[in-house]
Image (tube, rainbow, N blue to C red):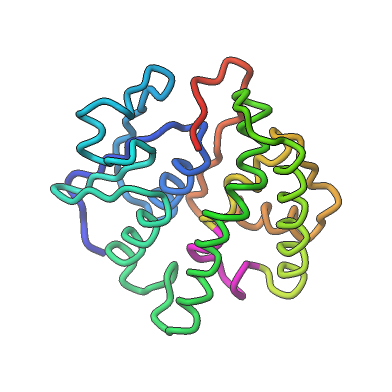
Amino acid sequence: MPTSPDLTLYGLRLSGHSHRAELMLSLLGLPYRFEAVDLLGGEQKRPAFLKLNPFGTVPVLRDGEAVVADSAAILVYLALKYDPERVWLPRDPLAAAQVQRWLSVAQGPVFNGPCKARLVKVFGLPHDHARAVEEAGRLLEVLDETLGETPYLTGGRANLADVAVYSYVAKAPEGGVALEPFANVTAWLRRVEALPRFLPMPAAHAEAEAPAA
């Protein structure tokens, strides 16, 4: 496996987007530094951070001179550079496309459902909570059906699809979204959590630092 002398992840540990990236770093066994971004203080909108990501969002990964912004892009980058056996992002075109489908789900239904519901309940953001819970319910129904057929989202072993979707689904109850009706989903969460070098996402508290979409 290639080595990296200088991996730094800029993010917020209460952010599911940041957690995806940090979880991937951990699963790959990569040494890295975590630099917390003060979202409440607006650090993400200041010139120094905007040089890393002009959109002013976390996470951002620095690997030596390379800078990669966006959680899904970071997952792909890490898998391509640091997983030569291509366990996490298959070489086969169809298998890779299936993974990409779930990366899109993570940025769409997962964001609009459990992520937004959590942003309302934990951070007080003015999203439509009822709509987010409804979106989360539809997502969980699809996930539960999918996971009734395979142990992981695209088949018999974990890959980037599971890493991308895990964080906000695991924390859905913090947004008022119940997981108990979805036995296949909860079993999948436990399987992901049993992976070697799994890194849990911290629980949110009332005094949480800032929203971290």
Residue at point 58%, 47% (across, down): 111
Tag count:
0
Q: Position of residue 69 (x, y in %)?
A: 32, 48
- Residue numbers of the magenta segment: 152-162
Residue at point 38%, 17% (across, down): 41
Q: Quadrant of the N terminus?
A: bottom left
Q: Quadrant of residue 145?
A: bottom right
Q: Quadrant of residue 192?
A: bottom right
Q: Is residue 159 magenta?
A: yes
Q: Main secondary structure of the magenta part?
A: loop
Q: Position of residue 170 (x, y in %)?
A: 65, 45
Q: Residue furthest left?
A: 65
Describe residue 51's horizontal placement relative to residue 199 as left or right.
left
Describe residue 153's horizontal placement relative to residue 213 as left or right.
right
Residue at point 74%, 56% (across, down): 140
Q: 125 and 179: which one is in front?
A: 125
Q: 9 and 72: which one is in front?
A: 72
Q: Position of residue 122 (x, y in %)?
A: 64, 26
With respect to residue 202, does 82 lie above or below? below
Describe residue 174's horizontal placement relative to residue 163 as left or right.
right
Q: 161 and 197: which one is in front?
A: 161
Q: Residue furthest right?
A: 181
Residue at point 52%, 31% (across, down): 14
With respect to residue 124, does 20 lie above or below? below
Q: Is residue 88 magenta?
A: no
Q: Position of residue 137 (x, y in %)?
A: 77, 52
